Image (tube, rainbow, N blue to C red):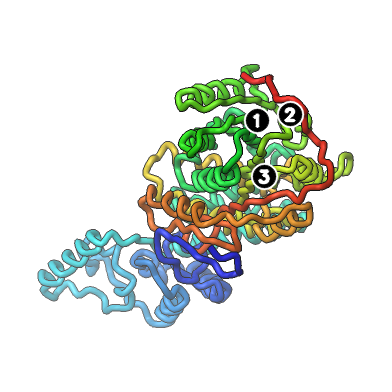
Amino acid sequence: MSSSGSSSSSCAGDARDQVDGLLAGAGYKVRSSELRQVAQRLERLETVMVNAPLEISHLADDAVHHNPSDLASWVDSLLSELNQPVPILGHADLPEFSDLGYAAAADIGRPPFNPTVDTSAWTEQRAAEEHSDITQQLPVVTAMEEDSGIRLVHVLMTCADSVQRGDFSLAAALIDQMQGLLTHVNSGCGIGKVAGYFIDALSRRLFTPQGAGLIGSAYENEILYHHFYEACPYLKFAHFTANQAILEAFDGHDCVHVIDFNLMHGLQWPALIQALALRSGGAPLVRLTGIGPPSPDGRDSLREIGIRLAELAKSLNVRFAFRGIAASRLEDVKPWMLQVNPKEAVAVNSIMQLHRLLLPDPTRGSPIDTVLTWIRNLNPKIITVVEQEANHNQPEFLNRFTEALHYYSTMFDSLETCSAQRDKALAEMYIQREICNVVCCEGLARVERHEPLGKWRARLSGAGFRSLNLGSNAFKQASMLLTLFSADGYCVEENEGCLTIGWHSRPLIAASAWQAVPEPNPQCGLINQPNNNVL
């Protein structure tokens, strides 16, 4: 694998044309560079529709799009058509064909139907064309839905801008307008679904107290996390990639210790335990410290997960010890709680957790700096970091909103390939909670502060870590993972020793590995005797 700026990739399908990602979900293609011009043309069309509804009714009823590739020209053709005299048919002259309300866009502008002409051949030809359309399963989007989809995006951005400017009365009015527009689009997929979630998030920001944005209990979040894991390859990619890097870092060590910043049912660790059990020369002693939130019902859920993992390790003849640390926030964990032995090879694993530490705390300093300092002092063999490849930590609300709208539109687009409807529905709820936190919350309540790989590189390098190349094995593992998903579109790419997985041309999740540059005489969190406080 090259560590240069060039990238290799493994994709489940070819990259899309460079079209606007938000509008592509609605079933049509508009180049990003043409978005402003298209919006202006649609506004002109809307003006005509309002001022002369009778004159445009024959177009509004008949116009249908079949994946238009040039929306601007199509709107121009409508405007041009409206400038010509429109034949008005009397009731007695109307054709007796119920399917004329679904004529193709190419039929607009054709001469009016003449009932005195023999139409039997035409009817047979038309029926054959419709059968062909059905056979080819072409997505059909009505002209009204096209218009409403573009206006939804436009009004969403205007609403976000009004929120940033503090014009909350205008924002509330725009939310009402968007609720009306939602009735004209398919809210079950594409831009309709995404817009619905963002409208809900904006409503919560305006009408509920700050920080009340769909938080949910820790137990609910774990359930949704599990279904997100099942519905799409993103978390599996994170676990496979991190496990491969940890396995290679533990090579030759007889006592290993994994510190997991978010245990979450322990989904990641059975595969690593099995891999260590097959290691030539025998399996090492494996210690796992799992950090997670306290159970709301008083159960020791971390210990229950540890017991299940211990039973698996026993069946594989792997010596295993587990320690659970209940903490509501990662910054509340102190290094002495980890009880690291100097003779252990340590791996620190963070799956989508470090971004939660990015809020500067005036009373306690920066949480991310504090945690990175004690991680470095542990002198681990490897730190695996997986984060959302997004920039949702911008101070300007409008920029953050725009980035989130693009990012989650792509995420929802990829989820449409999931055939398990229950997993898909609950995975969408998991993503909805992220959207609400990004859009609704500020200050300490906003924890979803995702940053792109470039910023993590700069931060970790500045904190005393050096990057490790994930290697060809991790790339192969991630590429093989894609074969488990039948949909074209998922893509794994190598980027300067790191790996990303995304949907078509948009990376969504980034994985990297790091090693601490040790300071002299590190003492933080170390103990002199092996830990016997296990299950």
Query: Which residue is depicted at the point 70% across and 37% down?
Result: 212
Q: Residue at x 65, y 46 (%)?
A: 382
In this view, the residue in front, 270 or 329, is 270
Residue that appears at 60% across and 22% down? 301
* Amino acid of disc 1: Thr
Above or below, comparing residue 253 to residue 173 in the picture: above
**Which image quadrant for residue 287?**
top right
Q: Residue furthest front?
A: 281
> Disc 3 marks which residue?
381
- Nearest the viewer among 456 and 436 is 456
The location of residue 483, given as percent across then percent down, is 38, 51
Residue hosting label 2: 339
Report the disc number at residue 228.
none
Q: Which image quadrant for residue 135?
A: bottom left
Residue at the image position 20 percent from the left and 67 percent from the top: 129
Secondary structure found at label 1 = strand
- The foreground one among 481 and 78 is 481
Tag 2 secondary structure: loop
Q: Which class describes the residues within 10 Å of circle 3: few (<14), some (14-19), or many (20+)? A: some
- From the image, tell me which residue sits under label 1: 289
**Sequence order check: which comes first, mark 2 or mark 1?**
1
Q: Is residue 4 above or below residue 272?
A: below
| Quarter of the picture holding the C terminus | top right
Q: Are marks 2 and 1 in contact (CB under 8 Å)?
A: yes
The mark that comes first in sequence, 3 or 1, is 1
Residue 380, image x, y percentages:
70, 42
Q: Secondary structure at mark 3?
A: loop
Q: Is residue 136 above or below residue 211?
A: below
Earlier-in-chain disc, 2 versus 3:
2
